[in-house]
Structure formats: structure tokens, C-alpha cells
Amino acid sequence: MNVTVRGKNRPYRTVTFDAPRNHIRLIEQRLLPHTFKIVAPRTFRETATAIHNMTVRGAGAIGATAAYGLAQGARAFRGSNRRKFSSHVETVYTVLKAARPTAVDPVNAMNEIRRVMAQGKSVAEQQAIALAAAEEFANADVQHCARIGWHGAKLIRNGMKILTHCNAGWLAFVDVGSATAPMYAAQAAGKKFHVFCDETRPRSQGATLTAWELAQQGVAHEIIADNAAGHLMQRGEIDLVIVGSDRTLGRTGEVANKIGTYAKAVLAKRHEIPFYVAIPLSTIDWNLRRGRDIPIEERHENEVLGAWGVTPSPKSKVHGLKSGKRVYVRVANPTSGARNPGFDVTPAELITGIITPVGIFQPTELWPRRRELGFTG
Amino acid sequence: MNVTVRGKNRPYRTVTFDAPRNHIRLIEQRLLPHTFKIVAPRTFRETATAIHNMTVRGAGAIGATAAYGLAQGARAFRGSNRRKFSSHVETVYTVLKAARPTAVDPVNAMNEIRRVMAQGKSVAEQQAIALAAAEEFANADVQHCARIGWHGAKLIRNGMKILTHCNAGWLAFVDVGSATAPMYAAQAAGKKFHVFCDETRPRSQGATLTAWELAQQGVAHEIIADNAAGHLMQRGEIDLVIVGSDRTLGRTGEVANKIGTYAKAVLAKRHEIPFYVAIPLSTIDWNLRRGRDIPIEERHENEVLGAWGVTPSPKSKVHGLKSGKRVYVRVANPTSGARNPGFDVTPAELITGIITPVGIFQPTELWPRRRELGFTG
């Protein structure tokens, strides 16, 4: 999507590849929204670090980064010995896979790259195929998101107020995003609407990443505390909810997503507000049989006990502190601990529809229509 | 309640009066939980400032502060001219009332003090009565909270996990608190239980004040993001919810409380978890006929867009920043705005019971049993 940096407005993707230098180029997401910076991991090990430390995050984005990382590692090999090359690629694969051990997208992406690489007859040919396959993977991610946008945009009517949670935007993919895709498509079609971004504590991806994205694209929006959505629904100020998903169960239609999604779905149901989940097909888990069995990551308590931010500018009317320094502040009582589940599971009965690249489905339709949705088991 | 300050454990009230010096003594709540400090407004004007700037906050606490403030102002009068004294007291009343113009507790408290003062036959006698009446008002607040505790404690069984929202603790009253009163009473009775404190964005009163209170009293607790309660309920980890209220409609049983309360009530209903509201009788509004008519304060967007905290200690393993400095950090995208409703309204159908100093009532019982509950209209 387009980003204005130092007065210049130009298109960026979350993840791209600089073939002459064999560098990956990533938007440094840990500095957003306060600083826009491109970082360029120069080796596959640096790429693995960028995935591990969440310089790049979001299912589609880390899938593409791993795909490019595999190509990057393969292309760094010098020589023509195919056995040594294979062993080297195996190392690259293992290092990149270990960067986010619970994520499934990097593994799926790299398996696909390796599958097509095997068709190459020499090291040089395999290296070229690896890069072409990684580019294809990244472009496919963008296409899938764009198709989510085409299907989802028809849900958005002029004047609507839309709630979203966390960041399922273009920063979480190579471009366009999942939950944001219908918004960008509706905007391109000239529709006017307003987005409420849940701030999404404890990591505040809504207040930081989604709000930044929407501001860059000129989409009207306001941030709200996660506590405020119920009140706004009660007062008739929300017409539609669209969120993303980290894992959607193909057999039951249950959706695992960022903590707090479930509460919004329960509130939406009570107020008869349509609640949609936007996903690429890679997010569907066709194996698991019960939402209860989705492992819920318990994250570090410091996320709940404090916040990351920058001290305000000297011009700010709020507080005359030295500006721009990024700090972690402890908000909570110093002698208290916290629980920090990272995700929750929303049952199918609360979900109006699932927006996919191939159309909008009721959650219970996923399994009967699994062939259309890419199930190959 | 007891507080440990510099190794010494001793009882404190949120608001007390130093009669020889004619000072009010307040816990400086804006510095909690990071610094425990007593401030002593020396004049009624300083007392009004302390109410206005939220050094002291919470319905019962500002009611008692205003009562003491009226006595403080009255006692500062020199002379025996009753007409001049009356005019002076009128000024004191007006200044204290203006400190939090929408709050009803200070007005009710001061009207009561003035009513009994009128029985005094000289300036000196009226001054003495003012102080005695203010002390009585403060003690009555403590008694009401203690009775909430007696009635509410029977809801708490060994091993229970209890959710609370915001701070309806002893810092919001003269002592004991409303939502926390049953917890302290159950603890005194030897029961073991665990409290989850919603952090309560955007002002984080749960993470700061409630967590500090519970830690000081040795009540087992953990802070959670406001987003996490739904997940914990889904997994069977919450047995009981107790919250406070800023205004409860006697005619309908609707409860206005800190933003986010409504969502917790909706979730509790879905999971068949008892949801109780603990209130002193002064919180009941016998006039208003519809919850929709309760004015909902829209607060400054900076509360949502950032957070107040301290930079961590140098020993902290998290980040090696200079410690202890209290700062506001901007978390959100700098070019985005926010909506910030401060309260929401929970309908009677979601409330299992209302814990009062005179017993536990179903919300729809308030009106038919209004005489027991102090309605004098």
C-alpha cells in the first residue's frame, strides 16, 4: 500500500526482495507507528532473527519472509556441488523454521519452495527457481488478500461504522491484508465509512499498526479502548465487525484470533451486528476437531503490566517531556503479576460469515465445501 | 486498611482529618501504585483542588473529603459574627461543589453537614458540630462498606476465582470499598480465593489501584488485559464477578459503571457466571427512569492514545532504563484520534444481584423495596 515518508507518497510491501544484493527488505514493525524504517537482512540467519524478534510479524508476512529467506540462503551458496548445496539448503530451512516454532505459514511456504526447486537440474538452476518461487509465493499472498477485498467490499455500505480488532492489515501480509482488505477495496470503490480500531491490549497492535495503516491510506478511523466497543454497540454506533484469524478450524468453523476477539463476537451477537472473519485459505486448519484443542500461547506478563510508547513532542500540550524516546513504562502495581493469554477461540454460532479469497462462507459451510477451499486431504 | 510503608504495617484511611492543624489528610492517588504519599490540604481551597485534580477520587472518598472540607473551611473562620460566618460557609460550599461539578456525593455530604450545623447556637458551636458531623459522615461511609462486606462475603467460597473491574476498593471510599468489601470480609473469615483484576484501560485503575490494594492486604490476585476475561470464562477460570457502580437506577436496576463493565456482564451471562454489583445506598438514583438517559462522559482522547507509568528499575531484566521516573508515553499512531466514553450502562437482566449495606437485592427489587433502601421521595 502507499506510505508517505518524508513527504513522498509511494507504494511499499511489507516484505520484498532485493535480488542484486540478495537482501530481504522488511518494514521494521517494532518501530511503527513512531518511526518508518526499512531494514535489510543480508543473510538467511539475519532473516531468521528478524522473524524471531518480530521485526516482521503476521501470518502472511512471515510466510513470505521465510520463502524469500530460503531463496536468499540458497543463492548465497557458492559452488556447483549438488550434495553440498542440498545440505546447505537443509540448514537454511531448519534455521528459518526455528525462528517462530509454532507458526505454520513459514513451514508451508518453504516446503512449497523446496518442492519446485527439486525440478532444477543444477545448483544455479535451483537457485534461480528458488527466487522465482519465492516471488510467486509473495505475489500469490497479495492476490489472495486482494480477492478477500473484492468479496468483502460488498458488505460495506456508505456511512457504515466498522469495528476491527488487532492488526490483520497489510503489515500482517505481504500487502493489502485480510480484515482490512474489504475496507481498502470499498475505499477504492469510492465508499465512505468509519473504522473503530480496538487498541488491542496488551500489545496495542490496533492503536499502533492498524491505526497507522488506516491513516496512511486515508481511511477515516478512531482508536477506542477495548472496553468501549460494548457501549458503542449499545448506542447503535457499530454496524459491522471484521477481524482476522490466526487459525480457523475447517471442521467446525471455530476461529482462533487475538485475545479479546471472542468478547466482541459475543457483544455483536447480542446487538445483532454482523461479525465477519477475513482469512486467506492458508489459515484454515483441516485437522483439528475442537476449538478447545487449539493451544493458547501464554505470553510474558510484562506485556500486561506496562506499555511501550514514545515520550511526547515538546510542542505537545500534554506534558513537556523530551520527545521521541521510545520507552517501556511499568503501569501496574510493582508487586502484582499478570496472566497473559495471547489468543481466544470464537465459536461458529457467533460468526456471520468467513470472507475468503474464493467467496464468503458461513462457518459451518467450510467442511462441506472443503474442496473449493483447497482441502486436499 | 493496612498499608506497609517503609517496612511498617499500619492502618490508613483514604481520607482523615487532622483536627489540631485543621488539615485534611489524603492518600495521593495519582502517584499510586509507584509512590505512597499522604498529602495534607491546609485550606478548603487546597481541598477543592485535591478533589478537582483527582488526588482523591471515588464516590465515597470525595464525599467524605467535601464533608471534611466544609468543616475545615468553617473552622478556619475567625470571629463570632454569625451572619459573616454563614456567608463564609456558603463560599466554602460553593468552592467545594465546583471541584467535581457532575458528582453527587460531595453535594449530598455537604448538605447533611450544613443541616446539622444549623442546630448550633454560636459560631464556635457550629464549627464544632461541623467537624463532628464530618467525622460521623466518614465513619458512616466505612460502616456502609463494612456491611456490604458482611452481606457479600457469603457469595465467596473457598477456591473461587473472582473477576473485578476498575477500582471500587477502599481507595474509592473512606475505607473497605464496595466491590472489594466482600473480598476483605471473606479473607478475614479465613477463606482462600483468587482475584483477577481487569487492568481497566484507558486509566488503568485496576492495574494500579485495585492491584495495589489487594497486594497490600495480601489477597491473591493477577492483573489481566480487559480483553482476557472472555477467554478465562470460556475455560472455566472465573466463578464470580463483583464490580462497583457510579450510579444505579432505583427504578430499573440499571447500573452505570466504568467503561467495559457491560461487556463483562454480557460475557458472564453467556457463561452463567454470577454477576454482582456492590454499592452503598448513596449510589442509587431514584429519579432517572431510563439508563439511556444517564449522561456518559466523553473523556480526553489522550487517555486512550497513551499510558502513564514509571520507567523500570535498573535491576529489571526487561529494559535497562533509568528507573522510577513517572512519564506519559504516546502508544498510538501519532496521526490518529480516539473516542473515549468513560462509562457504560449494564441492564438489570444481566445482573444477578446488588449487594448493599442492608442486604443483597435483585435489581428489579430495588423499586418495590425502596423504603428499606432509604428512598424518602
Image (cartoon, coloured by chain):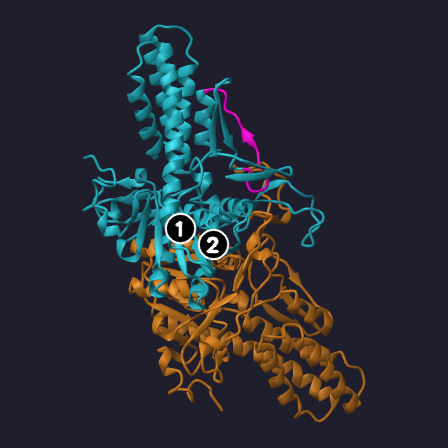
Chain colours: A cyan, B orange
| Horizontal relation, residue B343 to residue A105: left or right | right
In the rendered image, is residue A162 in sight?
yes
Q: Is residue B283 above or below residue B243?
A: below
* Residue nearest the viewer, comparing A275 with A311: A275
Q: Is residue A267 above or below residue B97?
A: above
Outermost residue toward the front in this view = A189
Q: Quadrant of residue A286?
A: top left
Percent x, y of residue B195: 40, 58
Q: Residues within 10 Å of mark 1 (few under 14, many from 20)?
A: many
Which amino acid type corresponds to the residue marked 1 in the rendered image? Ala
In the rendered image, is residue B188 in sight?
no
Residue ID at (40%, 74%): B355
Kindly state the secondary structure of the residue where label 1 is placed. helix
Do pointers 1 and 2 mark residues of a single chain?
A: yes
Percent x, y of residue A258: 39, 47
Residue ID at (77%, 91%): B83
Q: Chain of mark 2?
A: A
Q: Mark number for residue A191?
A: 2
Disc 1 + disc 2, Cβ < 8 Å: yes
Which amino acid type corresponds to the residue marked 2 in the rendered image? Lys
State the extent of the magenta-drawn residues as a range: A31-43
Q: Residues within 10 Å of mark 2 (few under 14, many from 20)?
A: some
Q: Is residue B25 above or below residue B89?
A: above
The residue that mark 1 highlights is A153
| Horizontal relation, residue B40 to residue B272: left or right | right
Kindly state the secondary structure of the residue where label 2 is placed. loop
Q: Is residue A140 above or below residue B376?
A: above
